[in-house]
């Protein structure tokens, strides 16, 4: 019986996995497969989302966790941007690209939630001294 949570339990990771599968499927089933550079870039960015969520979860340090979750969130932006390139240049991809952009946005928001949750847990563990960290965490969250 599993008693501890693992990254596979995270909604953010599960949705990121859907994103990876959707991107790979779009690339296979459209002309994107022939544009090696674009195909490789969007696939790497999607995999980066999923991998960085997993790696962030496995990190022990708060700053490290937040760093990896931020990278995942940024990679969501890269995927969304590249999906516009696909939609604008490959006929018949508009509907799928739009759905994947929405999914990427959802994953990005979930990654932001992981960042906020990690910050809250860190402050709670720190107790009264953690109250001094609130402005710092707020500043970091607004920068990244």
Image (cartoon, rainbow, N blue to C red):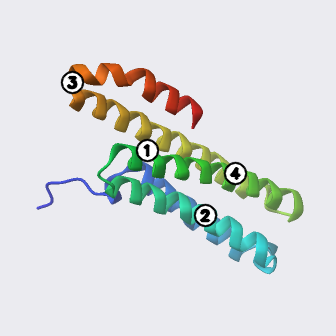
Q: Which structural element holds mark 3?
A: helix
User: Which of the labelled discs sits on residue 66, or is there none?
Assistant: 1
Front position among marks 2 and 3: 3
Residue corresponding to mark 4: 80
**Which one is in front, 14 or 131?**
131
Q: CA distance from mark 2 to mark 1?
A: 26 Å
Name the N-terminal-most of marks 4 and 3: 4
Residue 75 against residue 45 in the figure, above or below: above
Q: Nearer the viewer, residue 22 or 4?
A: 4
Q: Secondary structure at mark 4?
A: helix
What's the residue at 53%, 52% (across, down)? 72
Q: Of discs 2 and 4, which sits in the foreground? A: 4
Q: Residues within 10 Å of mark 2 (few under 14, many from 20)?
A: some
Q: Position of residue 85 (x, y in %)?
A: 82, 58
User: In the rendered image, which quarter is residue 19 located in?
Assistant: bottom right
* Residue that badge 3 annotates: 127
- Alpha carbon of mark 2 to alpha carbon of mark 3: how far? 43 Å
Callout 2 secondary element: helix
Pointer 2 or 1: first along the chain:
2
In the rendered structure, which disc, 3 or 1, sits on the residue that comes first in sequence?
1
Closer to viewer: mark 4 or mark 1: 1
């Amino acid at each position: 019986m599993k008693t501890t949570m693992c990254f596979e339990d995270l909604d953010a990771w599960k949705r990121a996995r859907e994103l990876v599968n959707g991107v790979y499927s779009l690339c296979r089933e459209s002309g994107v497969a022939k544009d090696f550079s674009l195909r490789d870039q969007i696939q790497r960015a999607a995999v980066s989302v999923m991998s960085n969520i997993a790696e962030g979860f496995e990190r022990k340090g708060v700053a490290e966790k937040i760093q990896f979750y931020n990278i995942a969130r940024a990679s969501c932006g890269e995927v969304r941007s590249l999906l516009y390139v696909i939609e604008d240049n490959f006929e018949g991809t508009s509907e799928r690209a739009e759905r994947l952009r929405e999914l990427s946005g959802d994953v990005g928001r979930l990654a932001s939630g992981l960042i906020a949750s990690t910050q809250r847990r860190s402050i709670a563990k720190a107790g009264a001294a953690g109250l001094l960290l609130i402005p710092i965490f707020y500043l970091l969250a607004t920068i990244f």
